[in-house]
Amino acid sequence: MIAAPLIVLVAAACAGSSPTQSAPIALAPRERTAVVTTTGCGFAADRAGSGVAIGGDLVVTVAHLVVQAEEVMVAVGADKAKPAEVLAVDLTRDIAVLRSPGLDLVEVEMREAAVGV
């Protein structure tokens, strides 16, 4: 199951940051914000939501947005929407991982997560 470690991955990206402590940011948050759109039947018909580009061609979004979608498209920043495939879905945690070839973004910096940080 890929989703559990992924949740830690996304949470760890912000770990240790505070107003007085800043790490070099390769991309501004708005450059990681993804618009995810779907087409299909029923619940997946003409839906739109958000996601976070975590690096390379990968985007994390909510699972309920992409479940049973016939087509998934992802647009990051001002770029034109590109087709995406659903790589993993965890309905219990409502998280999904998408791959959209051609995004080629800088990866999120990984850090150790700690309770209370």
Image: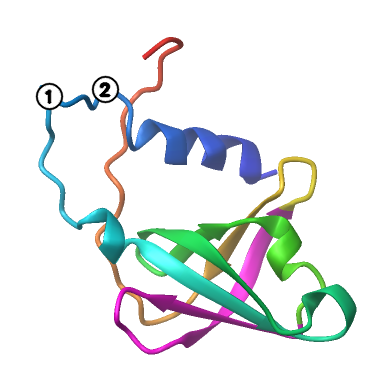
The residue at the point 75 percent across, 60 percent down is 64
Above or below — where is 105 with respect to 52? Answer: below
Residue 12 screen position, x and y as percent:
39, 32
Q: Of 29 and 15, which appears nearest the observer?
A: 29
Q: Residues within 10 Å of mark 1 (few under 14, many from 20)?
A: few
The residue at the point 24 percent across, 60 percent down is 106
- Secondary structure, mark 1, is loop
Quarter of the image that includes the C terminus: top left
3D distance between C-alphas at marks 1 and 2: 8 Å
Dot 1 or dot 2: first in sequence order is 2
In the rendered structure, which segment of residues is drawn in magenta?
70-89
Per the rendering, the mark at residue 16 is: 2
- Amino acid of disc 1: Gln
Whether residue 80 appears in magenta in the rendering, the answer is yes
Above or below — where is 25 with respect to 7? Answer: below
Quarter of the image that includes the N terminus: top right
Per the rendering, the mark at residue 5 is: none
Q: Are marks 1 and 2 in contact (CB under 8 Å)?
A: yes
